[in-house]
Image (cartoon, rainbow, N blue to C red):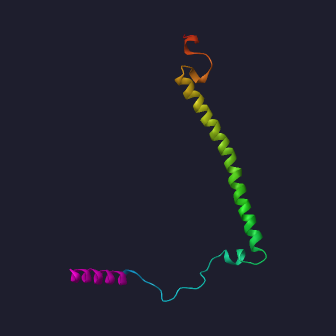
Amino acid sequence: MLSEDDIIEHSLDDLLSRSLHVPVCLSPTPHRPDRPVFAAPVVGHPLFLLLMLGVIQAVYGLGAPLQEGLGWMLDQAKTRWIGAAAGRPSGLGRPVSCWRTV
């Protein structure tokens, strides 16, 4: 049983050695284009805060009209569905029996 485990382990080691390449040493500082700008001691933090303010304002600026539109749409759907279930077409106040049929 141990010999079977050794065979499996050797075959997996062989497979990994053929398919996986590990570099000898990794670069201590990978190149990132934002590092010189945001890591600047004087300009970096205020610039980052302005960027975050812009992102937050964009989220709220786009989200508020979408939320109002979605609220209006759900109110319309609720009015029509509940009105139809209560026997009132389009959610109007009069019952269906008061409507004239032509």
Q: Give me the residue at 61% from left, 80% from top.
A: 31
Up-down: is 47 above or below 13?
Answer: above
Is residue 80 a member of the stretch shown in magenta?
no
Up-down: is 38 above or below 99?
Answer: below
Judged left or right of residue 46, residue 7 is left
Outermost residue on the right side: it is 42
* Spot occupied by residue 69 in the image (x, y as percentages of width and height): 65, 40
* Spot occupied by residue 100 in the image (x, y as percentages of width and height): 57, 10
Up-down: is 81 above or below 97?
Answer: below
* Spot occupied by residue 13 in the image (x, y as percentages of width and height): 33, 83
Q: What is the tally of numbered marks visible in this picture?
A: 0
| Prevailing SS of the magenta stretch | helix
Q: Give me the residue at 37% from left, 80% from top.
A: 19
Q: Give me the residue at 57% from left, 20% from top.
A: 88
Is residue 9 a member of the stretch shown in magenta?
yes
State which region is magenta.
Answer: 1-18
Q: Give me the residue at 36% from left, 81% from top.
A: 16
Q: Quadrant of residue 50?
A: bottom right
Outermost residue on the bottom side: it is 24
- Return the residue nearer the eye: 13 or 90: 13
Q: In which quarter of the image is the N terminus?
A: bottom left
Q: Quadrant of the C terminus?
A: top right
Judged left or right of residue 3, residue 96 is right
* Spot occupied by residue 36 in the image (x, y as percentages of width and height): 70, 78
